[in-house]
Amino acid sequence: MTRGRIHSFESMGLVDGPGIRVVVFFQGCPLRCAYCHNPDTWNLNEGTEITAKDLLNKILRFKPYFKESGGVTFSGGEVLLQPDFLIAILKMCKENGIHTVIDTSGFGIGKYDEILKYTDLVLLDIKHVDDVGYKYLTGKDKLYLDQFLKTVDKSNTKLWIRHVVIPGITDSEEHIFKLGDIIKKIKNVEKIELLPYHTLGINKYENLGINYRLKEVPPMNKEQTKKLEKLLEKYIT
């Protein structure tokens, strides 16, 4: 029986894909994003061990709430870090007529084709637009994201793009145009969301004894974020 580790389970999510959704947060993430608000998901060896079958049974309890547009979203952490477990639960969900979403940064260890075969929608968080900025924000290379994007493009899986706008880091018009250049090359993009950086997760870092690298950066202005989003939409159309 395929087993994996999950961090937590949210029964009535409204912002992690279409409709009312169960959100399963996987444990473990290879990135160390400077603004991550869930550093407690980083360690793959923590969290709760569960079989794919037991997880399916938890999800099925909420199926009556899904109606036409809802379903399950697998988030994290980074879902691609547990590919065998992810494939097993995705396959079971599809066998039970459940709409599936994966919320990912595109940083995984392979088996993308098999994962996407059972995925209806990908919520893709693009951390930065170039190699230097990506490594500064996440500690890892952008190469993995580029590889994932190629596989998604071939699979024709639908995409929602998300990008966090951080004052002084990802909030320039030049940066937004570079993001647009990436998006222009991707097929099946249904939606683009620019998310304003916030500081709500700082207390977790203090409690865990982890240094928060962006402590001097103020929250991003929501109105300015909307202006940049409109600029991006205009640029890519």
Image (cartoon, helix red, strand yellow):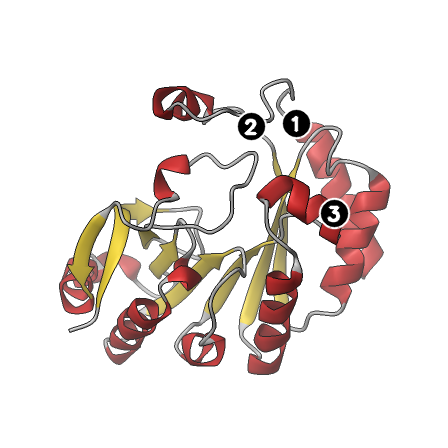
In this view of the protein, can residue 10 be seen by the observer? no
Q: Which tag is nearer the camera, tag 3 or tag 2?
A: 3
Q: What's the residue at 62%, 70% (across, down)? A: 147
Query: Could you say which is closer to the camera, residue 43 or residue 225?
Result: 43
**Marks 3 and 1 close (CB-CB < 8 Å):** no
Which residue is disc 2 drawn over? 198
In this view of the protein, can residue 112 be seen by the observer? yes
Label 2 secondary element: loop
**In 3D space, how far apart are the residues under numbered discs 3 and 1 (Cα atoms)?**
22 Å
Q: Which mark is residue 132?
A: 3
| Marked residue nearer the N-terminal end (3 or 1) | 3
**Amino acid at the residue labelled 2:** His
Few, some or many C-alpha atoms within 10 Å of disc 2 (few <14, some 14-19, many ≥20)? some
Residue 4 drawn above or below residue 127: below
Q: Which mark is residue 220?
A: 1
Taking the image as shown, residue 54 lies to the left or right of residue 229, namely: left
Q: How far across and down, in percent of the image, does residue 170 sit?
A: 73, 38
**In 3D space, how far apart are the residues under numbered discs 3 and 2 (Cα atoms)?**
22 Å
Residue 230 drawn above or below residue 112: above
**Marks 1 and 2 close (CB-CB < 8 Å):** yes
Question: Splitting the image into 4 quarters, where does residue 5 fall?
Answer: bottom left
Quadrant location of the C terminus? bottom right
| Marked residue nearer the N-terminal end (3 or 2) | 3
**Amino acid at the residue labelled 3:** Val
Taking the image as shown, residue 234 lies to the left or right of residue 81, namely: right
**In 3D space, how far apart are the residues under numbered discs 1 and 2 (Cα atoms)?**
7 Å
Question: Splitting the image into 4 quarters, where does residue 194 fall?
Answer: top right
Q: Which mark is residue 177?
A: none
Quadrant location of the N terminus? bottom left
